[in-house]
Image (cartoon, rainbow, N blue to C red):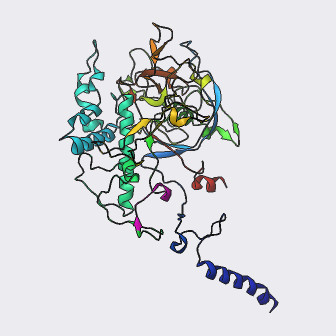
Amino acid sequence: MKKLSFVSPLLLSVVVFLASCGGKEKSSSTGWNYNDEKNGGFEKVEYTEQETGPGLVLIEGGTFSMGRTEQDITMDWANIPRRVTVSSFYMDETEVSNLHYREYLYWLDRVYGTDYPEVYKKALPDTLVWRSKVGFNEPYVELYLRHPAYNDYPVVGVNWLQANDYCAWRTDRVNEQILIREGILRVNPAQINEDNFNTDAYLANQYEGLVKDLLVDYNPNRDTRKVVMEDGILLPRYRLPTEAEWEYAALGLIGNTVYERVTERKIYPWNGHVVRNADEKYRGEMLANFKRGRGDNMGTAGYLNDNADITAPTVSYVPNDFGLYNMGGNVAEWVADVYRPLSPEDKDDFNPYRGNVFKTQLLDEEGQVAEKDSLGRIMYRDVTEAENEGRRNYRKADNINFLDGDEPDYIQYKFGATSMIDDQARVYKGGSWKDRAYWMSPGSRRFLDQRLSTDYIGFRCAMHRVGSPVGFAQKKAKK
């Protein structure tokens, strides 16, 4: 009886509480119920954690020494070591392949090909990058992008601008597929011109699509509603990784860390200071696709040292400790940053990045998001100093030259050695099938005009990690 008398008041209080609030969660700030149309309907969704987008791997962020891990052979002093912190993010497990890029080209031709053929032509890789004045590479010009034998090889001949356009397209296709999977939209293969799914346009109520179902709206003035950002259903944007993100992911120090102590310094994305596999089963085999020496791209017939004369399939060699393939060789990769030789000294020590041009959506006279452009995209403009008056963190839109003398056109740096560096010079990282082992050090950095492309530069996409920097799966494993 004593046990019963002790429990009963507790049970009674729970029953009274549930009856009083109808089982709904209350705001700890105001005491009002969430998700209750009787009191206004402010909604709080049940959210666990971010969904991992197709092709991505979670990169748990942290602090690391960014910069040179190898000797500064070029004597440029352009990668001075400096400790920085990178937030958690997602990165593609592999480079973007020819098959992935042809899927993109096919979609552009299907949607815009009739009325806006220039959109498709603008996205085409430059296959002529394979040509050499004194080398026979014509088969790659004709076959590398299109032939199914090269489906899973990294796409090349893509400039920095084209790589960004691909990331934007991929964002929309992934979010459209999520809405279809969740029963919000129907599949619409007949999209054409401006009538195509665009994430920004959907969130701005500028795109309807083939609606299958709508969400229940707790607002007493409405019955249903579309998906909004607060639902946590749509993923953040696919984009190019920053230089810091790429370098951090390539080093993969997570495999060399005991508590907060890095137990072994890395020169390459793998342990040790050599480029051959030390494992007994694979001893002597190359760990990446690179140029071993003058005139040696793959070794001797019967025992090819890296089994690749040019590029290799994107899933080749041993992945690093983050599970990423070919962060050391195969193709060098575009990153988001504008190049400056002293960037390591100038940039923030938290999520360092140079290249910010702040924009905002274009609004009409009534303050609403303006109509879509002819391609179905929401239009953006640079922010103005007038509308940022009073801000302390930034005033103008273009901050590429911040702390850099604000040169209007270009910076002349060792003219004749590294030519001219301007605001179109973009960083690319890592070594390639055409490079010596030196460039496979994650700290190495080079640059190229964003409008140019080569036969040895590709790219992979990244995505911001929202919320907790560590996924629940990793938390449970640590415990």
Q: Residue at x 46, y 31 (%)?
A: 335
From the viewer's perspective, tell me whether residue 421 is left or right of residue 48.
Answer: left
Q: Position of residue 148 (x, y in %)?
A: 26, 39
- Magenta stretch: residue 231 in it? yes
* Residue lying at the far front of the rendered structure: 365
Q: Position of residue 382 (x, y in %)?
A: 44, 34
Q: Residue at x 57, y 55 (%)?
A: 473
Is 281 drawn above or below residue 196 in the view shown? above
Q: Camera-side residue: 331 or 51?
A: 51
Is 44 drawn above or below residue 240 in the view shown? below
Residue 152 visible in the picture: yes
Range of residues picked out in magenta: 224-232
From the viewer's perspective, tell me whether residue 324 is left or right of residue 364.
Answer: right
Q: Hey, which quadrant is residue 278 in on the image?
A: top right
Q: Camera-side residue: 456 or 287?
A: 456
Which quarter of the figure is the C terminus placed in? bottom right
Q: Position of residue 419 (x, y in %)?
A: 44, 11
- Magenta stretch: residue 387 in it? no
Q: Position of residue 254 (x, y in %)?
A: 61, 40
* Residue lying at the far top of the rendered structure: 416
